[in-house]
Amino acid sequence: MVEPVSVVRDIPASPERVWSLVTDLPRMGEWSPENRGGEWTNGATGPAVGAEFKGRNASDKRSWSTVVKVIECDQPRKFAFALMVAGRSWCDWVYEIEPTASGSRVTHSWIDRRSRFGARLGKWLSGVADRASHNRRNMEATLENLARAATA
């Protein structure tokens, strides 16, 4: 397991506006370089603790789907979901939103919970050897794109 990866970005938009974007998982493909969107499943229609979402992802020539479960939903401050594999969390994705004088400060974090076997399997499935560095770059791009969307 690697250390958590976090990136921070100030966005000139209200926490409520930023919240509405980061919790709209079907639209996440508009901002994320790897995620391609997806849909709420098992009766879920939006963010709530326990809600599940099936996401589509792609990196280079590989694509795969994931199931995530919302684990924290504290509007408009914190939204977190766990990538679930065989009933176990492989990693958590967290958005923390703080109000600032000019809008919001967003901290986006990835917490790796995979076993060594899970890390090897993830590398094989996604084609990404250094997941932490890869995710940092993608998270920075995601926050940049979210900032553009929040201020549009």
Image (cartoon, rainbow, N blue to C red):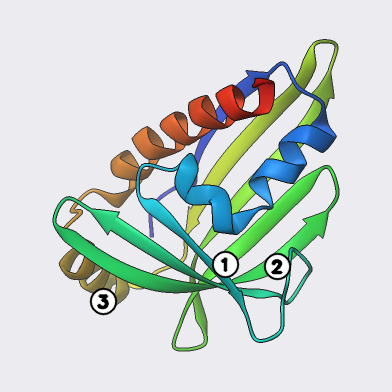
**Which of the two residues, 72 or 113, is positioned nearer the viewer here?**
72
For residue 17, side relative to residue 106 (left or right): right
Q: Are marks 3 and 1 in contact (CB under 8 Å)?
A: no
Q: Which mark is drawn over residue 117? A: 3
Q: Are marks 3 and 2 in contact (CB under 8 Å)?
A: no
Indicate the position of residue 117 as horizontal and vertical percent values: 26, 76
The residue labelled by disc 1 is: 82
Cα separation, mark 3 vs mark 2, equals 24 Å
Q: Secondary structure at mark 3?
A: helix
Q: Residue at x 44, y 43 (%)?
A: 32
The mark that comes first in sequence, 3 or 2, is 2
The mark that comes first in sequence, 1 or 2, is 2
The residue labelled by disc 2 is: 71
Q: Is residue 59 above or below residue 71?
A: above
Q: Are marks 1 and 2 in contact (CB under 8 Å)?
A: yes
Q: Which mark is drawn over residue 68? A: none
For residue 135, side relative to residue 122 (left or right): right
Indicate the position of residue 19 as horizontal and vertical percent values: 75, 42
